[in-house]
Amino acid sequence: MKAQNLASIFLYIAVIFHLLGMSGWTSAKLAQPIELAILALMLLSIFILRKKKRKKRRARRPAPEVAVMLEHAEEGEPDK
């Protein structure tokens, strides 16, 4: 399952919990656990969607043939 799909499912569940808590169908004792569940689902979605920082790659050294071609081009000699 892709990360975006999983995060959207968690967000939908958080919205449902929020609507359930706001509707008044739940008892007052369940208000805090529902709010904590909403917070946990939202934070989980954020961590899922977070992109990893990638390390910068070093530039690869050009092949020896490229160095020779550069030397010829700088000297103005035609390629043989």
Image (cartoon, helix red, strand yellow):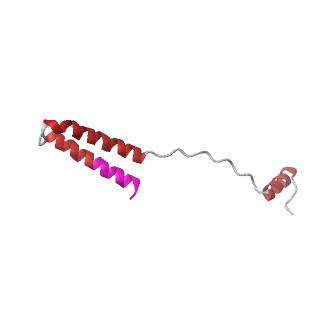
Percent x, y for residue 46?
Answer: 38, 43
Res 35 quadrant in image: top left
Magenta highlight on residue 38: no
Magenta highlight on residue 7: yes
Prevailing secondary structure class for the magenta stretch in the rendered image: helix
Left or right of 22, for residue 13: right
Report the quarter where the C terminus lies: bottom right
Percent x, y for residue 26?
Answer: 13, 41
Q: Residue at x 55, y 46 (%)?
A: 54
Res 34 quadrant in image: top left
Q: Residue at x 83, y 56 (%)?
A: 68
Percent x, y for residue 15?
Answer: 24, 45
Report the quarter where the N terminus lies: bottom left
Res 55 quadrant in image: top right
Q: 62 or 72, which lies in front?
A: 62
Residue furthest to the bottom? 80
Left or right of 10, for residue 26: left
Residue furthest to the front? 29
Q: 62 or 46, which lies in front?
A: 46
Q: Residue at x 36, y 46 (%)?
A: 45
Q: Residue at x 35, y 50 (%)?
A: 7
Which portion, as a residue range, is magenta? 1-12
Left or right of 44, for residue 12: left
Total numbered labels:
0
